[in-house]
């Protein structure tokens, strides 16, 4: 227990010493290198957070923050037993983090070795192809889904959102092709090399085909639904993606998201689901609200006149 309290006391004293140094710094003592150093640290910290937020590690990161806050409360109220347990589990926790974040760390190192890493580093999320898909992509998805439904061609289309599906993308074959209805129909055509499994859509492009998805263990799923629907629900339980399912038996089009399935959709219903997850939808809705308010204001002026 003494070791835990000593670690906490050392940490607190270090923070206090650093705060005192910052307090007594005068403008004359600030060097150009200090400003550059602060900028570099801030810049790297920002991009680390952006990278974490784009992966499933974001949820784990928030859980770690909760645990650290709990330990901080224990330090404030001198809960020595909790502090001793926390200090004893430091080495185990570091090893566990390396195992848990292994896919994300591997992806980060892979991006570090790419030629375009520098240009991506200076992209502050202002580029327009960061997961956003166009209205044309929505039209192509709707058209392909119902064309395949007419001839009862089974399909599984995963539309990626904020959580990157790299680990499932690796289980398939890389494509990186512009999404069109003709491409989707050809991929899922029976007895073709790529028809088995799911495709992953990122932005306006199909990034991979024949991907394997995790099956849901939910007991609430209807027995009428097969492996294709269970896989769609499974991927929606571990990510924020939306999955379009075309039934091979009935030709019905369904959507799975947030662990739920919406069955037997028509074209307008599928389009509405896709519009909801489209990043531009929030901006469009704000403009629509503003336009409605302006129209209401004009009507009121006419009535008063």
Image (tube, rainbow, N blue to C red):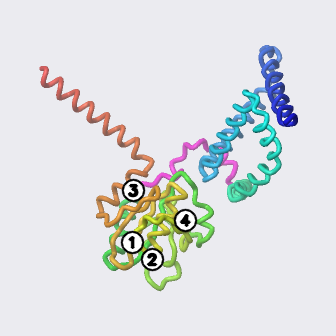
Task: Give the mark, 4 or 1, whose residue is nearer the N terminus.
Answer: 4
Q: Quadrant of the C terminus?
A: top left
Residue 18 can be seen in this image:
yes
Residue 300's x, y, as percent? 18, 25
Residue 115 can be seen in this image:
no
Nearest the eye: 104 or 15: 15
Q: Main secondary structure of the magenta part?
A: loop
Q: Is residue 302 left or right of residue 258?
A: left
Task: Give the mark, 2 or 3, whose residue is nearer the N terminus.
Answer: 2
Q: Kindly identify the residue that appears in the image at 68 percent across and 41 percent down.
A: 67
Mark 4 vs mark 1, foreground winner is: 1
Task: Give the mark, 2 or 1, whose residue is nearer the N terminus.
Answer: 2
State if disc 1 and disc 2 touch (CB < 8 Å).
yes
Q: Is residue 5 left or right of residue 304?
A: right
Q: CA distance from mark 3 to mark 4?
A: 18 Å
Name the residue tied to disc 2: 188
Name the residue tied to disc 3: 274
Residue 100's place in the image compared with 69, above or below, is below
Q: Kindly identify the residue that appears in the image at 26 percent across and 30 percent down.
A: 294
State if disc 3 and disc 1 touch (CB < 8 Å).
no
Task: Tell me the magenta residue range.
Answer: 114-136
Q: CA distance from mark 2 to mark 1?
A: 10 Å
Name the residue tied to disc 4: 207
């Amino acid at each position: 227990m003494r070791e835990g309290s000593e670690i906490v006391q050392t940490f607190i004293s270090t923070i206090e010493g650093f705060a005192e140094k910052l307090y007594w710094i005068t403008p004359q003592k600030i060097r150009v290198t200090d400003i550059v150093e602060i900028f570099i640290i801030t810049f790297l910290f920002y991009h680390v957070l952006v990278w974490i937020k784009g992966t499933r590690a974001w949820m784990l990161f928030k859980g770690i923050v909760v645990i650290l806050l709990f330990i901080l409360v224990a330090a404030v109220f001198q809960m020595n037993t909790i502090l001793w347990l926390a200090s004893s589990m430091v080495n185990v926790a570091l090893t566990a983090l390396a195992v848990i974040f292994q896919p994300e760390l591997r992806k980060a190192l892979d991006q570090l070795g790419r030629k375009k890493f520098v240009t991506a580093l200076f992209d502050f999320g202002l580029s327009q192809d960061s997961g956003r898909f166009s209205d044309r992509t929505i039209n192509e998805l709707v058209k392909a889904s119902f064309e395949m439904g007419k001839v009862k061609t089974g399909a599984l289309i995963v539309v990626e959102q904020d959580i990157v599906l790299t680990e499932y993308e690796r289980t398939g074959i890389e494509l990186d092709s512009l999404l069109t209805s003709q491409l989707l129909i050809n991929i899922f055509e029976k007895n073709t090399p790529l028809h088995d499994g799911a495709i992953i859509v990122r932005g306006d492009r199909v990034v991979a085909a024949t991907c394997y998805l995790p099956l849901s263990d939910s007991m609430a799923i209807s027995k009428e639904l097969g492996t294709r629907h269970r896989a769609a629900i499974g991927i929606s339980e571990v990510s924020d993606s939306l999955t379009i399912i075309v039934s091979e038996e009935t030709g019905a089009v369904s959507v799975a998201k947030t662990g739920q399935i919406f069955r037997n959709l028509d074209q307008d219903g599928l389009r509405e689901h896709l519009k909801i997850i489209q990043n531009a939808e929030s901006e469009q809705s704000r403009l629509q609200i503003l336009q409605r308010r302006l129209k209401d204001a004009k009507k009121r002026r006419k009535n008063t006149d």
